Protein backbone atom coordinates (compact mmCIF):
# COMPACT_ATOMS: atom_id res chain seq x y z
CA UNK A 1 0.00 0.00 0.00
CA UNK A 2 1.47 3.35 -1.03
CA UNK A 3 0.45 6.79 0.24
CA UNK A 4 -2.13 7.23 -2.56
CA UNK A 5 -3.71 3.85 -1.86
CA UNK A 6 -3.89 4.61 1.87
CA UNK A 7 -5.64 7.96 1.33
CA UNK A 8 -8.01 6.35 -1.14
CA UNK A 9 -8.88 3.59 1.33
CA UNK A 10 -9.51 6.13 4.11
CA UNK A 11 -11.89 7.98 1.79
CA UNK A 12 -13.69 4.79 0.78
CA UNK A 13 -14.05 3.64 4.38
CA UNK A 14 -15.49 7.01 5.31
CA UNK A 15 -18.23 6.51 2.70
CA UNK A 16 -19.41 3.24 4.21
CA UNK A 17 -22.75 3.31 6.11
CA UNK A 18 -21.27 1.81 9.25
CA UNK A 19 -18.79 4.71 9.37
CA UNK A 20 -21.34 7.51 9.40
CA UNK A 21 -19.10 9.93 11.27
CA UNK A 22 -17.11 12.49 9.31
CA UNK A 23 -13.54 13.63 9.58
CA UNK A 24 -11.64 10.34 9.14
CA UNK A 25 -8.08 11.22 8.24
CA UNK A 26 -6.12 8.11 9.23
CA UNK A 27 -6.49 4.39 9.88
CA UNK A 28 -4.78 1.64 11.81
CA UNK A 29 -4.24 -1.99 10.93
CA UNK A 30 -6.24 -4.69 12.71
CA UNK A 31 -4.11 -7.83 12.95
CA UNK A 32 -6.27 -10.94 12.66
CA UNK A 33 -4.17 -13.31 14.75
CA UNK A 34 -5.77 -16.19 16.63
CA UNK A 35 -3.70 -17.85 19.33
CA UNK A 36 -3.57 -21.63 19.58
CA UNK A 37 -6.17 -23.41 21.71
CA UNK A 38 -4.00 -26.48 22.25
CA UNK A 39 -4.32 -27.64 25.90
CA UNK A 40 -0.62 -28.54 25.99
CA UNK A 41 1.29 -25.34 26.92
CA UNK A 42 4.43 -26.31 24.98
CA UNK A 43 2.56 -27.26 21.83
CA UNK A 44 0.40 -24.15 22.19
CA UNK A 45 3.49 -21.92 22.33
CA UNK A 46 5.12 -23.62 19.34
CA UNK A 47 1.96 -23.25 17.29
CA UNK A 48 1.79 -19.58 18.25
CA UNK A 49 5.40 -19.11 17.13
CA UNK A 50 4.69 -20.66 13.72
CA UNK A 51 1.53 -18.61 13.25
CA UNK A 52 3.24 -15.37 14.30
CA UNK A 53 6.18 -15.91 11.92
CA UNK A 54 3.73 -16.55 9.08
CA UNK A 55 1.68 -13.46 9.95
CA UNK A 56 4.78 -11.24 10.17
CA UNK A 57 6.40 -12.21 6.86
CA UNK A 58 6.94 -9.14 4.65
CA UNK A 59 4.88 -9.02 1.47
CA UNK A 60 6.79 -10.03 -1.66
CA UNK A 61 6.29 -8.72 -5.15
CA UNK A 62 4.90 -10.88 -7.95
CA UNK A 63 6.69 -13.96 -9.25
CA UNK A 64 8.09 -11.99 -12.19
CA UNK A 65 9.41 -9.08 -10.10
CA UNK A 66 11.87 -10.03 -7.33
CA UNK A 67 12.01 -8.20 -4.02
CA UNK A 68 9.50 -6.91 -1.51
CA UNK A 69 6.70 -4.37 -1.86
CA UNK A 70 7.19 -2.27 1.25
CA UNK A 71 10.51 -0.50 0.86
CA UNK A 72 10.07 2.90 2.54
CA UNK A 73 11.48 3.31 6.04
CA UNK A 74 8.16 4.62 7.41
CA UNK A 75 6.07 1.79 5.92
CA UNK A 76 5.02 -1.40 7.66
CA UNK A 77 6.57 -4.24 5.68
CA UNK A 78 3.45 -6.39 6.27
CA UNK A 79 0.47 -4.12 5.57
CA UNK A 80 2.24 -1.10 4.05
CA UNK A 81 0.55 1.41 6.33
CA UNK A 82 2.27 4.76 7.05
CA UNK A 83 3.74 4.43 10.56
CA UNK A 84 4.99 7.98 11.09
CA UNK A 85 2.04 9.17 13.17
CA UNK A 86 1.27 5.89 14.91
CA UNK A 87 1.73 5.69 18.69
CA UNK A 88 3.93 2.75 19.72
CA UNK A 89 3.65 3.33 23.46
CA UNK A 90 6.25 1.43 25.49
CA UNK A 91 7.27 -0.54 22.39
CA UNK A 92 8.93 2.59 21.01
CA UNK A 93 11.58 2.62 23.74
CA UNK A 94 12.05 -1.14 23.42
CA UNK A 95 12.55 -1.32 19.65
CA UNK A 96 13.29 2.19 18.40
CA UNK A 97 15.90 3.25 20.94
CA UNK A 98 19.41 2.05 21.66
CA UNK A 99 19.21 0.26 25.00
CA UNK A 100 22.53 1.78 26.14
CA UNK A 101 22.59 5.33 24.76
CA UNK A 102 18.76 5.71 24.50
CA UNK A 103 19.26 7.36 21.11
CA UNK A 104 16.55 6.86 18.52
CA UNK A 105 17.40 4.20 15.97
CA UNK A 106 15.28 2.64 13.21
CA UNK A 107 13.73 -0.77 13.58
CA UNK A 108 14.24 -2.66 10.33
CA UNK A 109 12.23 -5.80 9.69
CA UNK A 110 13.95 -9.04 8.67
CA UNK A 111 12.78 -10.96 5.61
CA UNK A 112 12.77 -14.11 7.73
CA UNK A 113 11.03 -12.25 10.61
CA UNK A 114 13.43 -13.51 13.28
CA UNK A 115 16.53 -11.37 13.95
CA UNK A 116 19.45 -12.49 11.79
CA UNK A 117 17.30 -14.62 9.50
CA UNK A 118 17.38 -13.42 5.91
CA UNK A 119 18.23 -9.78 5.35
CA UNK A 120 17.01 -6.55 6.80
CA UNK A 121 14.58 -4.37 4.88
CA UNK A 122 14.37 -0.61 5.03
CA UNK A 123 10.71 -0.90 6.07
CA UNK A 124 9.53 -1.31 9.66
CA UNK A 125 6.45 -2.62 11.52
CA UNK A 126 3.28 -0.77 12.53
CA UNK A 127 2.34 -0.78 16.26
CA UNK A 128 -0.13 -3.66 15.84
CA UNK A 129 2.35 -5.93 14.07
CA UNK A 130 5.08 -4.75 16.45
CA UNK A 131 2.98 -5.98 19.37
CA UNK A 132 2.70 -9.38 17.70
CA UNK A 133 6.46 -9.32 17.06
CA UNK A 134 7.04 -8.57 20.75
CA UNK A 135 4.86 -11.53 21.75
CA UNK A 136 6.81 -13.69 19.30
CA UNK A 137 10.10 -12.70 20.93
CA UNK A 138 8.70 -13.60 24.37
CA UNK A 139 7.49 -17.00 23.14
CA UNK A 140 10.89 -17.75 21.62
CA UNK A 141 12.65 -16.70 24.82
CA UNK A 142 10.45 -19.09 26.81
CA UNK A 143 11.08 -21.84 24.27
CA UNK A 144 14.85 -21.38 24.50
CA UNK A 145 14.75 -21.45 28.29
CA UNK A 146 12.84 -24.73 28.39
CA UNK A 147 15.00 -26.25 25.64
CA UNK A 148 17.97 -26.32 28.03
CA UNK A 149 16.83 -28.41 31.02
CA UNK A 150 20.39 -29.35 32.00
CA UNK A 151 21.48 -25.76 32.57
CA UNK A 152 21.47 -25.96 36.37
CA UNK A 153 23.20 -29.35 36.33
CA UNK A 154 26.07 -28.01 34.20
CA UNK A 155 26.48 -25.06 36.54
CA UNK A 156 26.57 -27.43 39.52
CA UNK A 157 29.47 -29.34 37.93
CA UNK A 158 31.33 -26.04 37.72
CA UNK A 159 30.73 -25.40 41.39
CA UNK A 160 27.98 -22.83 40.88
CA UNK A 161 24.92 -23.05 43.08
CA UNK A 162 22.00 -20.68 43.61
CA UNK A 163 20.94 -20.01 47.17
CA UNK A 164 17.59 -18.32 47.92
CA UNK A 165 17.78 -15.32 50.20
CA UNK A 166 15.21 -13.11 51.88
CA UNK A 167 15.76 -9.39 51.59
CA UNK A 168 15.23 -7.26 54.67
CA UNK A 169 13.67 -3.84 54.59
CA UNK A 170 16.88 -2.17 55.69
CA UNK A 171 18.60 -3.56 52.57
CA UNK A 172 16.24 -1.67 50.28
CA UNK A 173 17.35 1.52 48.60
CA UNK A 174 18.18 4.20 51.15
CA UNK A 175 18.04 6.92 48.47
CA UNK A 176 14.37 7.56 47.71
CA UNK A 177 15.20 10.74 45.76
CA UNK A 178 17.38 8.78 43.34
CA UNK A 179 14.51 6.37 42.75
CA UNK A 180 12.10 9.29 42.35
CA UNK A 181 14.13 11.27 39.82
CA UNK A 182 15.62 8.42 37.77
CA UNK A 183 12.63 8.32 35.34
CA UNK A 184 12.95 12.08 34.82
CA UNK A 185 16.65 11.77 34.07
CA UNK A 186 15.91 8.96 31.62
CA UNK A 187 13.42 11.19 29.78
CA UNK A 188 15.99 14.00 29.62
CA UNK A 189 18.53 11.58 28.14
CA UNK A 190 15.98 10.55 25.51
CA UNK A 191 15.47 14.21 24.58
CA UNK A 192 19.20 14.79 24.27
CA UNK A 193 19.38 17.35 27.10
CA UNK A 194 23.07 17.74 28.04
CA UNK A 195 24.15 16.54 31.46
CA UNK A 196 27.60 16.70 33.05
CA UNK A 197 28.77 14.28 35.71
CA UNK A 198 31.53 15.04 38.22
CA UNK A 199 33.21 11.90 39.51
CA UNK A 200 34.89 11.80 42.89
CA UNK A 201 38.60 11.08 42.18
CA UNK A 202 38.94 9.09 45.41
CA UNK A 203 35.79 6.98 45.57
CA UNK A 204 35.11 6.89 41.83
CA UNK A 205 31.44 7.64 42.48
CA UNK A 206 29.42 10.29 40.72
CA UNK A 207 29.09 13.09 43.25
CA UNK A 208 27.52 15.86 41.19
CA UNK A 209 25.32 16.01 38.10
CA UNK A 210 24.41 19.25 36.36
CA UNK A 211 21.59 19.55 33.83
CA UNK A 212 21.62 22.34 31.25
CA UNK A 213 18.27 23.53 29.89
CA UNK A 214 19.06 25.86 26.99
CA UNK A 215 15.80 27.37 25.71
CA UNK A 216 17.31 27.96 22.27
CA UNK A 217 18.24 24.29 21.98
CA UNK A 218 14.84 23.16 23.25
CA UNK A 219 13.07 25.24 20.61
CA UNK A 220 15.28 23.90 17.82
CA UNK A 221 15.04 20.27 18.93
CA UNK A 222 12.37 18.09 17.32
CA UNK A 223 9.76 16.86 19.82
CA UNK A 224 10.17 13.32 21.07
CA UNK A 225 7.62 10.69 21.93
CA UNK A 226 6.42 7.28 20.85
CA UNK A 227 5.88 8.06 17.16
CA UNK A 228 8.19 7.89 14.15
CA UNK A 229 7.14 11.39 13.12
CA UNK A 230 8.19 12.78 16.48
CA UNK A 231 11.84 11.89 15.93
CA UNK A 232 14.31 13.76 13.78
CA UNK A 233 13.30 12.15 10.48
CA UNK A 234 16.36 13.50 8.64
CA UNK A 235 18.59 11.65 11.08
CA UNK A 236 16.32 8.60 10.91
CA UNK A 237 16.64 8.38 7.13
CA UNK A 238 20.38 9.01 7.37
CA UNK A 239 20.80 6.05 9.72
CA UNK A 240 18.68 3.87 7.42
CA UNK A 241 20.78 4.87 4.42
CA UNK A 242 24.02 4.16 6.26
CA UNK A 243 22.76 0.72 7.28
CA UNK A 244 21.78 0.01 3.69
CA UNK A 245 25.24 0.95 2.46
CA UNK A 246 26.80 -1.36 5.04
CA UNK A 247 24.61 -4.23 3.85
CA UNK A 248 25.69 -3.68 0.23
CA UNK A 249 29.36 -3.66 1.23
CA UNK A 250 29.10 -7.07 2.92
Image: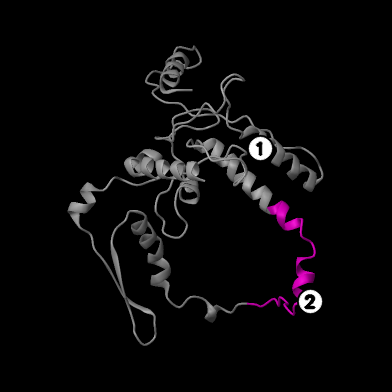
* Residue at 61% over, 33% down: 57
Task: Tell me which corner region of the image, top left, top right, bottom left or bottom right, holds residue 157.
Answer: bottom right
Q: Is residue 243 left or right of residue 221?
A: right
- Residue 165 falls within the magenta-colored stretch: yes
Q: Are marks 2 and 1 in contact (CB under 8 Å)?
A: no
Percent across and percent down for residue 212 are: 24, 63
Q: Furthest residue to the right? A: 40
Label 2, secondary structure: give it: helix
Look at the image and say whether residue 151 sits in the magenta stretch: yes
Q: Find disc 1 in the rendering and name its residue.
A: 52
The picture quadrant where one finds residue 183 is bottom left
Q: Secondary structure at mark 1?
A: helix
Region of the chain picked out in magenta, as a range: 142-166
Counting from the top left corner in percent of width and height, residue 19 is at 47, 17
Q: Which mark is residue 157?
A: 2
- Where residue 176 appears, as percent x and y from the top left, is 42, 72
User: From the viewer's perspective, is 114 left or right of 228?
Assistant: right
Residue at left offset 46%, top offset 50%: 93
Query: Which of the marked residues, 2 or 1, is nearer the chain's N terminus?
Result: 1
Report crowding for label 1: few under 14, some 14 to 19, many 20 or more residues within 10 A (C-alpha): many
What coloring was used for the rendering? one colour
Q: Residues within 10 Å of mark 2 (few under 14, many from 20)?
A: few
Amino acid sequence: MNDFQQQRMIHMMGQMPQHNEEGYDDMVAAVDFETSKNPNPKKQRRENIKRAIKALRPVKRSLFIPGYRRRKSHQCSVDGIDCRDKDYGDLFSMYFRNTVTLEVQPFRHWTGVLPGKGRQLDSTLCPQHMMLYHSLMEWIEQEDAEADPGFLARLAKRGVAFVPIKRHKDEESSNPLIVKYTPIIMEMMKDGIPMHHYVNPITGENDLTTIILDNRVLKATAPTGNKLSSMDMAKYYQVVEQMGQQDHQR
